[in-house]
Amino acid sequence: MHRARWLIDLQVGSLPYINYTLGGIPSSKEFPKSKESIGPTGKTDNQLKTQNFNVERLKRTLVPASLDNSDSFDGPDIPRTERFLWMSLVWLIYSLTVVTIINLVYEWLTSKARFTIQSRPVNVYEIPFPALTFCSTNQFRPSAVNLTLLHRKALMRQALSPEEISLLDLSNNVCFSDTNVEESFIDDKVINYMIQKVSQKCTDVFKGVWWRDEFIGNACDYMQTVFTPYGLCFTFNPLPMTSLYSKHAIPLIKKQQELGNSGRLLDRNTSWTLEKGYDTQSFNWAEMVPLRTVGDERRQPLGAAISLDLHDYDDTCYAGFRGYHLSVHSPTETASSPIHSWYPIVHGALNQLKLKVHLKQTSESMRSWPVKKRGCYFDNERHLYYFSTYSERNCVSECLSNRSFTVCNCVPLHLPRTAEMAVCGSSTIGCVLDTFGWHLSPGLTLRCQ
């Protein structure tokens, strides 16, 4: 008797099939013939075997046990059409897999990085105290300029001197008023006269400043004179001008500080940088630029006695109330940008302002990433023309200034510029508004790339 050899191949997840390979062909004596019997379905044994054979062949064709099984493609009982169909299907699956992988790799290489913000506790003394910009509503003192009389003469079309015309045109920009006077440009001599004589001086505004119950003598020596959409203002706790402005803007800024009696900020050095933080452990206000506090304590970190001088006040330059406009911003920025927020400090009322600080830090490991990939700049990777420190608000101010000067040949009073650039008057400010397509008013939201 010849022995039969059984080869069994079972695959998990697919239909098993069995290959029978016989070692020899049995003789008729060993396997006698038997009569065909009819099953319960009404089919003979040979018909049932033929049907089962066709089902097994279909299973092997559509659901093979493994892709590397050659019997699935070149078996002796598989027609060419079925083999071609199966080969085409396999190549289609492989092609789609390769295309999908290529697309995923391309998206990973070209898309921006997705950041996750992980909160961590930060000591409050690591964060600089914000800069505060105060703008008085008394921009034109009657003792220096009778603005009411000039407005009346302009409305009645009476003769005005060139100096009076320039002052009226300047009031149109500072007080948001409207007269019959329209000049193309504002002379720098008139602007300097406003700083020195017309508006309130820093020493007239701040009668006393206390930092953590310690009196700061000559507080105006540590403040900065700056023009904003609300006119001439004073900023407490900014960075020194040599750290805030570039060499292109320093000459004009220095002259304005000297006229406004707030020029000592030029001689100080900062003890803090945006990326490294403070380089000193001292909390003495004379040694820290900008100032910082130790945290929540019973005494207030900052106190100031501010004078409005209602005896020398002109309501012609009306701001809607009597008092001050206050802007709270980073020491690395100026309040000259129109996208800063402003709060009214009303005279004769209790004014409270609650600050909530959000600190977001970027890991140093991101420096090796391309700028387009991470979607942001480090401070030393982006340089501005008028500012030494890069921020979104500083960038917006510079973009507006450059755009205005390119199209209208002048710059609005509150935007950064050089001494050679003219200041826009009432007749050219319309060009600025048309160029940007919006009104230069506080609270504007604008993004700059």
Image (cartoon, rainbow, N blue to C red):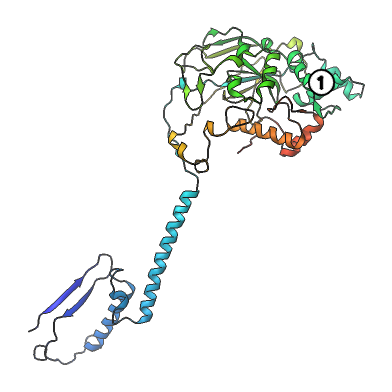
Tell me the quarter of the image containing the C terminus: top right
Q: Is residue 435 visible?
A: yes
Q: Which residue is most to the left?
A: 1
Tell me the quarter of the image containing the N terminus: bottom left
Q: Is residue 380 left or right of residue 145?
A: left
Q: Is residue 270 left or right of residue 408?
A: left
Q: Residue at x 58, y 18 (%)?
A: 237
Q: Looking at the image, is 406 positioned above or below residue 261?
A: below
Q: Is residue 41 visible?
A: no
Q: Give the SS element for disc 1.
A: helix
The spot of residue 264 in percent (x, y) is 62, 13
- Viewer-closest of 243 and 66: 243
- Viewer-closest of 70 and 354: 70
Q: Amino acid at mark 1?
A: Leu
Q: Residue at x 57, y 15 (%)?
A: 268
The spot of residue 66 in percent (x, y) is 29, 68
Q: Is residue 408 left or right of residue 386?
A: right
The spot of residue 29 in percent (x, y) is 8, 91
Q: Which residue is mark 1?
A: 167
The spot of residue 106 in percent (x, y) is 47, 53
Q: Looking at the image, is 335 positioned above or below residue 268?
A: below
- Viewer-closest of 85 and 140: 85
Q: Is residue 389 left or right of residue 202?
A: left
Classify residue 182 by image quadrant. top right
Q: Residue at x 56, y 10 (%)?
A: 210
Classify residue 352 by image quadrant. top right
Classify residue 215 by image quadrant. top right
The mark tally for this picture is 1
Q: Looking at the image, is 29 positioned above or below residue 407?
A: below
Count neighbours of disc 1 (C-alpha within 10 A) and say few if under 14, some if 14 to 19, many if 20 or more: many
